[in-house]
Image (spheres, helix red, strand yellow):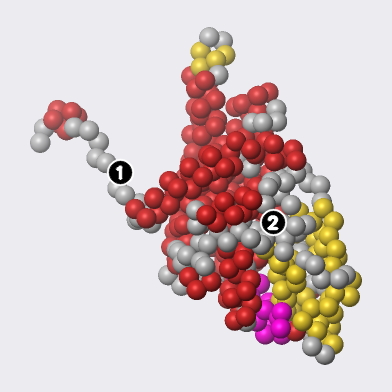
Amino acid sequence: MSAAMRETLPPPAAPASPFYTAEHEAFRDTLRRFVSREIAPYVDEWDEAGEFPRELYRKASSIGLLQLGYAEEFGGVPTDPFYRIIVSEELAKAGSGGVNASLMSHSIGAPPIAALGPDWMKRKVLPEILAGEKISALAITEPSGGSDVANLKTTARREGDHYVVNGQKMFITSGFRADYYTVAVRTGGPGASGVSLLLIERDRPGFSRTKLRKMGWWASDTAQLFFDNVKVPVENLIGEENRGFIGIMLNFNQERIGLAAGAHGFARVCLDEAIAYARERHTFGKPLIANQVIRHKIVDMAMKVNAVKANLELLAWRVHQGERPVAEICMLKNLATTTLEYVANEAMQIFGGAGYLRGAKVERIYRETKVMTIGGGSLEIMKDLAARQMGL
């Protein structure tokens, strides 16, 4: 074939992703329409109100969102990790991390129940959560420490057929209005070997909550929890006594991949918003995007966002194969969240004053970037954990 003929042919079609099937894309389409109809029009109102309607959980369940990744016998839909990436990408398009965090709080609160809980608990609690009838929360972090789970101070003292729980939890997503709390407690001696998990219902005497005001994630229900001689039946133990640390660590790996996927989704939104604005906004008689400095900013943003996506999808595939690449997951979480900080900052700079006004997606996302580098393990702790896993 001559060079002239080759130049007249259209470029070859991009190969289909090796990670996503037609079923994945059908679910993406369903979720995209749900977000545009049920979430995006209301995020400003919900942000200012500091919460969103409980009915949203039931609506999310009606399209199969809450059920992803859980066994069919409990009302779930078994899936692979790529459905969760799709969830993060599509929910991010509404531009509200606060809505996403509370709506999906069961993704960190319920897995220990599904993996380690007694049969009665799975059959009673999981169907209610997955149907959107009840809200699930995970309660690990304490006022005295976050990622240092092995040294948590909330105690659960065995008295007959009950545990008596005393202590506090901090920064708990869905903490004020959750119905079920998966709570890390100390049932044994010091260190990781003395930690257990309990299911604690919201209406138990001595259990109280206080709402927290935050820099971002305004629509997310975040609370401090107080346990004052709260009696919890022994049957509410999740897994074995003094073996809860294992369940917590397994949960952290999934949570950190989820945080990375969420950070990638919001970074992509900032990139898309910046491109659209730069094409629409005119300065000195020409579109903003006509300036080389703006185009270079956008290229740098896209380069970093695409790098996160490639790393995220490869690690998701490895986890799906049964691997536990803890060091790589820690590094992915840091890469994704610092990329979000960079991209959100550059998007704000491109928007200028328009990005500083409430109601702009980039303004809200910019406020919410910092929580992503803290929640689920801070940047510094992720580096230290990765280093230990690498034998350094």
**Residue extending furthest left?**
1
Q: Which element is circle 1 on?
A: loop
Kind of residue at badge 2: Gly
Please give the label number shown on residue 14. Answer: 1
Residue at position x 74%, y 79% in the image = 195
Residue drawn where x is 50% and y is 53% of the image: 63
State the mark number for residue 267: none
User: 349 left or right of 317?
Assistant: right
Amino acid carrying mark 1 in the image: Ala
Instruction: Please state if 366 lies on the left or on the right of 25 as rendered.
Output: right
On whether residue 245 falls in the magenta region, the answer is: yes
Residue 20 in percent (x, y) is at: 38, 54
SS for callout 2: loop
User: Which residue is identified by label 2?
Assistant: 375
Check if residue 51 falls in the magenta segment.
no
Residue sticking out furthest to the top: 285
Image-based side of 369 in relation to 336, left or right: right
Q: Is residue 325 left or right of residue 19?
A: right
Cα separation between marks 1 and 2: 36 Å
Q: Earlier in the sequence, mark 1 or mark 2?
A: 1
